[in-house]
Image: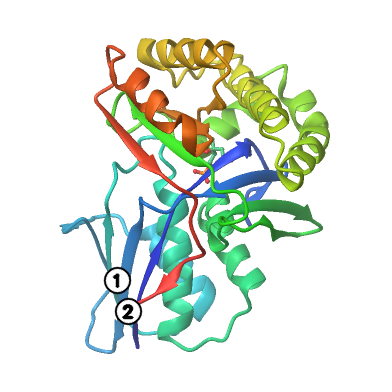
Amino acid sequence: MQATVRASPNIALIKYWGKRDEKYNLPAVSSISITLDEIWTETKINFSPNHKRDILTINNVQQDDTRRVSDCIDSICGEHRNFACVSSKCNFPISAGLASSSSAFSALVIAINQAVNKGYELQDLANEAGKASGSAARSMLGGFVELENKKNKIQINQLLQSEDWPLRVVIAITDSQKKAVSSSEGMKLSSKTSPFYNSWVKNQSEDIDEARKAILSQDFLRLSEISEHNCMKMHSVMWTSRPSIVYWNSATIECMHAIRELQKKGEFVFFTIDAGPQIKAVCLPECESKVVNILKEIRGVSSVLQSGLGQEPQIK
Ligand code: PMV
């Protein structure tokens, strides 16, 4: 009745922003991501008839609110179950736009399935992870992952394994505080108020097709162009929500300019930004040290994390 699983977050190259179904947390758009390896969440779950309620600790701090985790366990095990003790450790800042919920919930659903021997298939578990956090479904696979929107569910497909195209990711941390507007609140607001929201949803399949082709042909410049464009479109939807949602700070913008300068010099690097102020620079391995050196000198960048592309979650 216990299991430990380590999973890595993923970073979307073609973003998800908006939901088509609140109850099952189904995304309004398909998305494409890369799974990382050097940064991870490790989650241990232990069910026991002796527990009086679910207990959740994150980085050794007991949490008052276990609702999202309890709902996820109920959804897989049913409500007539033993209570669980869930202990999760993360080697990177949480709730700061580094997709910690993607590694947390992909690790959790696999740990639950393993601990109670439910025998769920990968796609079912991806739907369970997605119910808790839309992006978590993509961390169920390694490498390059497409999350496809299907009728009443989602499906995840691996486009390439991490070894097939070993890109590097350099993450510039510009603020590690918890974000002011959660992704779910932000998505709700954008879908109700941004005049750009409908065209964002309508045009997503073109971006998905373009990125898929770029990935399958390992065409870095093609992937770079469509990923930056898609990121800027998502942030335009955020910015034009009412009230406006701006996750960037001045260092975020400085980093974007620095990456554009590197591109002009012929370096193979592009940026992407999620619901937070961190910059994620995706690059070819031979450009990594230049990208790190430039980003770490930018005022407001407190640290720089480096990662390769990783595997699906590992049961310990
Ligand atoms: O999985 P959530 O609910 O934290 O939403 C993630 C949304 C973005 O990170 C902004 C984009 C994405 O596709 O990961």
Using a 10 Å C-alpha cutoff, classify the residue at mark 2 as few (fewer than 14 neighbours), some (14 to 19) or many (20 or more): many
- Secondary structure of the residue carrying tag 1 is loop
Residue 158 vs 113, above or below: the answer is above
Using a 10 Å C-alpha cutoff, classify the residue at mark 1 as few (fewer than 14 neighbours), some (14 to 19) or many (20 or more): some
Q: Quadrant of residue 299?
A: top left
Residue 160 horizontal/vertical position (percent): 67, 55
Specify the amino acid type for callout 2: Phe
Q: Quadrant of residue 152?
A: bottom right
Residue 258 horizontal/vertical position (percent): 45, 12
Which residue is the site of mark 1?
54
Specify the amino acid type for callout 1: Asp
Ligand 1 within 8 A of label 1's CB?
Answer: no
Residue 229 vs 7, above or below: the answer is above
Quarter of the figure that contains the N terminus: bottom left
Image point (31%, 14%), residue name: 298
Q: Which numbered dot is residue 83?
A: 2
Q: Is residue 309 left or right of residue 303?
A: right
Quarter of the figure that contains the C terminus: bottom left
Q: What number of labels is visible?
A: 2
Residue positioned most to the front? 286
Q: Is residue 91 visible?
A: yes
